[in-house]
Image: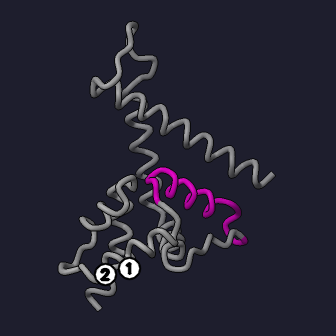
């Protein structure tokens, strides 16, 4: 049953992302339909904002994301049930975060070139599909503590 719940939430998140992408294509004019949109833009926009708020407000998620980045470790669900794993999974999928090994490789390529306190521009070039919010978090968790320390 645990695998079913986890896979079901990933499918739901993927469907939401698909609907948001469709809506953004309609709004930008990249896609047109003869009868108008089949999706209510205001509802989708508020849903997107709420998902992003949920993904940014969880302190446990920040800890789990840090462990994922540093050690490739998935949350231990014995205390919170599946909640932590599902939240981390949603975050990784929502912001298109690659595997921790790809992030480590990108960081190894960035470190020798790092002149300023931010690796965001270079990480953006190395991880073009990853959302800028996730790149900012990666920078905060992996670069900023080392630069200031």
The stretch drawn in magenta includes residue 87: yes
Instruction: Tell which of 25 and 20 is nearer to you.
Output: 25
Q: How crowded is mark 1: few (under 14 residues within 10 Å), some or many (20 or more)?
A: few
Image side of residue 4 versus residue 57, left or right? right
Q: Residues within 10 Å of mark 2 (few under 14, many from 20)?
A: few
Q: Name the residue under label 2.
A: 111
Q: Which residue is drawn at 75% across and 48% down?
A: 4
**Image location (x, y in percent) of residue 80:** 67, 66
Q: Circle 2 — which element?
A: helix
**Image location (x, y in percent) of residue 28:** 27, 28
Q: Name the residue under label 1.
A: 108
Question: Marks 2 and 1, Cα distance to the nearest angstrom?
Answer: 6 Å
Q: Which residue is drawn at 39% across and 56% down?
A: 130
Q: Please determine whether, in this image, residue 52 is positioned above or below residue 24.
A: below
Q: Residue at x 39, y 52 (%)?
A: 129
Instruction: Tell which of 112 and 121 is nearer to you.
Output: 112
Q: Please determine whether, in this image, residue 43 is positioned above or below residue 37.
A: below
Q: What stretch is highlighted in magenta?
A: 78-97
**Image location (x, y in percent) of residue 121:** 24, 65
Q: Residue farthest to the left?
A: 116
Are circles 2 and 1 on residues that touch, CB within 8 Å? yes
Q: Circle 1 — which element?
A: helix
């Amino acid at each position: 049953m645990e695998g079913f719940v986890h896979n079901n939430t990933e499918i739901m998140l993927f469907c939401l992302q698909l609907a948001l992408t469709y809506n953004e294509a309609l709004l930008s004019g990249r896609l047109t339909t003869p009868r108008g949109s089949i999706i209510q833009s205001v509802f989708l926009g508020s849903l997107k904002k709420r998902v992003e708020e949920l993904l940014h407000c969880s302190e446990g998620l920040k800890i789990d994301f840090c462990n994922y980045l540093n050690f490739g470790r998935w949350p231990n669900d014995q205390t919170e049930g599946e909640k932590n794993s599902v939240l981390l999974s949603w975050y990784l999928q929502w912001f298109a975060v690659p595997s921790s090994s790809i992030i480590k490789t990108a960081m190894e390529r960035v470190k020798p070139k790092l002149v300023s306190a931010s690796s965001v521009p270079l990480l953006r070039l190395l991880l073009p599909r990853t959302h800028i919010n996730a790149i900012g978090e990666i920078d905060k968790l992996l670069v900023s503590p080392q630069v200031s320390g």
